[in-house]
Amino acid sequence: MLKLTRKDYDALRQHGEETYPNECCGILLGSIEDDGTRVVTSTARCGNTRTDSAHNRYNIDPKELVRIQREGRQRGEDIVGFYHSHPDHPAHWSKTDLAEAHWFGCSYVITSVEKGKAALTNAFELTGSDEVDKRLVDDPIEIA
């Protein structure tokens, strides 16, 4: 399960609207409870570094990722997930999303942005033990 505040949930959806018709992307920071629930305590917007197909792909600069991870750890937060938008496409992971997901145990949040307005937001947890058996499974979102 993924727990988000209303503020963080609204912020990631707004980010998708602002970058439409391109994909937005960002990082979810917080902690993981003993039962595996990922609790988000802050979000970090990232720039989409894709220049070839930003309308249907995203990439977070590794330097930006490391900087955000370092800053989060200084506040006692870990990376618990990532988010991105799907402009004019469903809020479901694609084959590319699965292929490019590598943070096991993290949530991957996708917001469908239809004609510039955020629609459905879904979350998926990356499970498995390695690249061969990894999969994205439904991850319920709880908004506090």
Image (cartoon, rainbow, N blue to C red):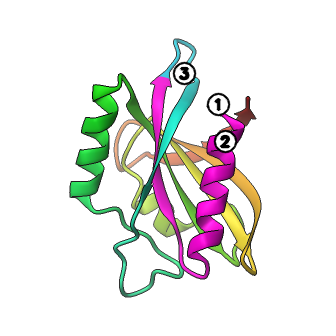
| Residue type of the residue flagged with mark 3 | Gly
Going by the image, does 52 lie left or right of 139?
left
Residue bearing the label numbered 2:
7
Residue bearing the label numbered 1:
3
| Residue type of the residue flagged with mark 2 | Lys
Q: How far apart are marks 3 and 2 (CA)?
A: 22 Å
Of callouts 3 and 1, which one flags the residue occurring earlier in the amino acid sequence?
A: 1
The image position of residue 18, as x and y in percent, is 60, 71
Q: Does the magenta stretch include residue 26?
A: yes
Numbered badge on residue 36: 3
The image position of residue 54, as x and y in percent, is 46, 80
Q: Does the magenta stretch include residue 29?
A: yes
Q: Distance between the residues labelled 2 and 1?
A: 12 Å
Going by the image, does 48 lie left or right of 41?
left
Residue density around tag 3, few if under 14, some if 14–19, many if 20 or more, within 10 Å = few
Of callouts 3 and 2, which one flags the residue occurring earlier in the amino acid sequence?
A: 2
Instruction: Name the secondary structure under disc 2.
Output: helix
Q: Which residue is drawn at 55% across and 28% down?
A: 38
Q: Of residues 16 and 140, which is closer to you in this image?
A: 16
Residue density around tag 1, few if under 14, some if 14–19, many if 20 or more, within 10 Å = some
Instruction: Name the secondary structure under disc 3.
Output: loop
Instruction: Name the secondary structure under disc 1.
Output: strand
Q: In this view, does 63 lie above or below 43?
A: below
Nearest-to-viewer mark from 3 and 1: 1
Q: Are marks 3 and 2 in contact (CB under 8 Å)?
A: no
